[in-house]
């Protein structure tokens, strides 16, 4: 049962690893608009791609997310092995009108309101990517619902099927299921995601 597995992990050495990662996310409150924007670009890259691949590319490109032309960015992404290098380069360049993304996000009353803004205004950002970004810059109350999370919920009978696509309504429904699980194991959504990801993959990434 999922609850039991999470409780066991909370009593293992992996708790320290997850706690450290959460503190890294929280440290974003002291970082610049530019660092927040680079994290947004990472989340744009990971849609239909791997987290490991996104981390590697983010490390390689760095400040180039802010300065490279669309063509230069395309070339870099292609060379670094991104499957959708044209579209992702386009989305990143379009997103530059929100280079002050930290100021924008912090102007909202909470992360859920900020998420709606991100989904409506930034191409390439859906609910999963917006939630991923907000969690990575230190927010707690949004869930990153990816295939690993869906499969774990399905296998533990929290959902009847794995949906092929997630509408806003379905996303929020499943997020509430995760919130209930989090309350039972005394974890915020930001923490719960890392525990379930570790259960599925044996890794703690971002």
Image (cartoon, rainbow, N blue to C red):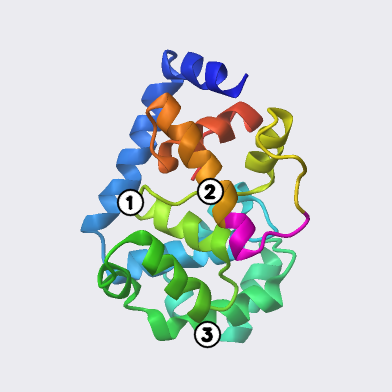
Q: Is residue 167 magenta?
A: yes
Query: Residue 88's spot in the image, x, y percent?
Result: 63, 73
Looking at the picture, tell me which residue is in the foreground, 156 or 38. Answer: 156
Q: Is residue 140 visible?
A: yes
- Crowding at mark 2 (Cα within 10 Å: few <14, some 14-19, many 20+): some
Residue under label 3 = 94
Check whether the beta carbons of the residues at disc 2 and disc 3 lie within 8 A of each other: no
Give the numbered dot on residue 63: none
Labels 3, 1: front one: 1
Q: Is residue 64 visible?
A: no
In the image, taking residue 85 as reference, residue 124 lies left or right, namely: left
> Quick check: 84 above or below 129?
below
Residue under label 2 = 175
> Which mark sits nearer the N-terminus, 2 or 1?
1
Furthest residue toward left: 30
> Quick check: 37 above or below 178?
below
What residue range appears in magenta?
164-171
> Quick check: 173 above or below 120?
above
Which quadrant would residue 101 be assigned to in this image? bottom left
Residue under the image location 75 percent in, 40 percent down: 160
- Measure the alpha-carbon separation of dots 3 and 1: 24 Å
Q: Secondary structure at mark 3?
A: helix
Query: Residue 72's spot in the image, x, y percent?
Result: 59, 81
> Which mark sits nearer the N-terminus, 3 or 1?
3
- Measure the alpha-carbon separation of dots 2 and 1: 18 Å
Looking at the picture, tell me which residue is in the foreground, 138 or 28. Answer: 138
> Which mark sits nearer the N-terminus, 2 or 3?
3
Residue under the image location 52 percent in, 85 percent down: 94
Labels 2, 1: front one: 2
Give the numbered dot on residue 138: 1
């Amino acid at each position: 049962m999922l609850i039991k597995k999470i409780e066991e992990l909370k009593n293992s050495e992996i708790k320290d690893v997850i706690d450290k990662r959460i503190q890294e996310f929280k440290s974003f409150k002291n970082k610049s608009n530019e660092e927040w924007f680079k994290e947004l670009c990472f989340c744009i890259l990971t849609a239909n791609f791997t987290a490991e691949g996104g981390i590697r590319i983010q490390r390689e490109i760095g400040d180039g997310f802010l300065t490279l032309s669309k063509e230069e960015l395309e070339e870099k992404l292609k060379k670094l092995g991104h499957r959708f290098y044209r579209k992702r380069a386009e989305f990143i360049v379009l997103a530059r009108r929100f280079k002050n993304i930290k100021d924008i996000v912090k102007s909202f009353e909470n992360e859920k309101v900020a998420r709606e803004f991100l989904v409506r205004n930034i191409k390439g950002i859906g609910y999963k990517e917006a939630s991923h970004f907000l969690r990575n810059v230190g927010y707690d109350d949004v869930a990153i619902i990816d295939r690993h999370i869906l499969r774990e919920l399905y296998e533990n009978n929290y959902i009847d099927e794995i949906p092929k696509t997630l509408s806003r309504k379905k996303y929020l429904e499943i997020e509430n299921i995760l919130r209930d699980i989090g309350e039972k194991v005394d974890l915020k959504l930001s923490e719960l995601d890392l525990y379930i990801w570790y259960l599925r993959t044996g890794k703690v990434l971002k």
